Image (cartoon, rainbow, N blue to C red):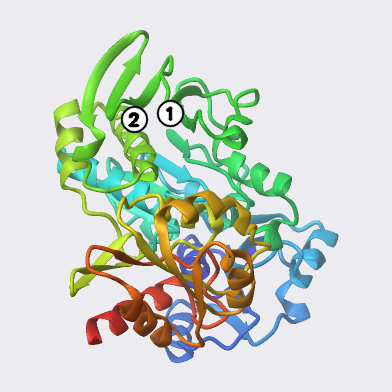
Amino acid sequence: MNITVIGAGKSGLEAAKLAVKKGENVFLTESKIPANFDFLKKEFENYNINFELGGHSEKALNNCDLIITSPGVPPHSEIIRRAESLEIPIISEIEYAYKYLKNPIIAITGTNGKTTTTSLTAYILNNSGKKAVAAGNIGKPLASLVDNIEDDTIIVAELSSFQLDRCYKFKPDVAVILNITPDHLYYHGSMEEYIQAKFKISLQQSPENLLILNADDSATMGILPSTKAKVAFISLKPVVRGAYCTDGLIKLVEQHNEEELILASKLGLPGVHNTYNSMAAALAARAFEIPNENIRDSLITFRGVEHRLEFVRTIDGVDFINDSKATNINAAWFALASYSRPIVWIAGGRGDNNDYSQLNEIVQKNVSNIICIGEEKQAIFNHFCAMKRCIQVDTLLDAVLEAKKVARAGEVVLFAPACKSFDMFINFEHRGEEFKRIVNSL
């Protein structure tokens, strides 16, 4: 079979290497000249992968039987449209890797909380004597796992809407949809298309599989009529099956049998959003018969993931927190709701039709000052300046220095941009690393 891989990022490269191992003829095409060109060239030569960089030529689709597209390639890009006009099948790296994997799979998606829930679920499983690996959007492509892990290792896969969009036969044993709020609409075109991409996580599930849904999220609950899987819920109100938290106590429910799991105040991660994440991880672990006491111990000791409410340093009684992964309004809301102390909020970057009015109440309640940066700094200033002191600055260094100047002992400096990173940084990781470097240099 002649396979064309679009995109030379981690997932594209691993998909190409896997296809070669499976005896296919592979051609990789990339629109840019990657910074790691020398490394890629060696990999292409080692695996006998034909390639082109810096644009997509006609030979990318000549005699092509299948396309594997990387998650960053928009569905409206020219090469995708050309392939569709030629009726060439297009799948994602997730879909391609899945047909070669024999492992149990827990798949986790949602606009926010995917990385934390994926890491926490793998942590619980490994802490409880199971073999588990976190993969997918969290950094390790599924294609890299094929033939490289034991069949009984549980794959806990964080999946973005980009990755799910081209999945058709993917069938996880456990699927989780944490929440769905407007995001990546520049890619999907509409909220409806974005929701449909998320729903593909359960498209092929059957009654022996488990789907975990957020009962408090109306968009997430829209999948109920179409799924064939057994469903469990997470909620802040009582549910018939799943996990819920009321009066600060998380309970597990199965067929009217309730068990107390843990006080939310004892969770290793703060904030109501992490209560949801913890409940989802607990239910996914229970699906693999992990005892409550193991789940409880892991929920207490887990300390989170990098760039998500990550404690950096205390300076003169002020805590500096890195939440660079808050790339949209909903993520910023959860970050701002996670602290009872006054917050000096550093916000801004590249907007995605951001509706800042959704943050009015939480900003009014929890924020003392706002430091505005990036392409959205004027929009953020204009929206909030009537209710809070807002300061516009040009660089992240300026933002940190200004935050340090205005913050009082006992307050929190929270870097939760509510925006994409691409105006000033390569990605949110690069942005978070730079924030931490600046804070640690003070």
Residue type at tag 1: Ser
Rate crowding at label 1 as few (under 14), some (14 to 19) or many (20 or more) other CA atoms within 10 Å.
Answer: many
Residue 285 marker: none
Q: Residue furthest bottom?
A: 38
Residue type at tag 2: Leu
Q: Image height check: is 282 above or below 47? A: above
Residue 235 marker: 1
Q: Is residue 124 visible?
A: yes
Q: Image height check: is 415 above or below 36? A: above
Q: Secondary structure at mark 2?
A: helix
Q: Nearer the viewer, residue 288 or 436?
A: 436
Q: Position of residue 297 (x, y in %)?
A: 14, 38
Q: Residue at x 32, y 39 (%)?
A: 278
Q: Is residue 65 visible?
A: no
Of the image marks 2 and 1, the number of the one nearer the N terminus: 1
Q: Secondary structure at mark 1?
A: strand
Q: Residue at x 34, y 39 (%)?
A: 275
- Badge count: 2
Q: Position of residue 207 (x, y in %)?
A: 50, 20
Q: Residue at x 49, y 81 (%)?
A: 425
Residue picked out by circle 2: 283
Split into 4 quadrants, where in the image is the N terminus? bottom right
Q: Position of residue 42 (x, y in %)?
A: 43, 86
Q: Nearer the viewer, residue 345 or 423?
A: 345
Q: Residue furthest right?
A: 85
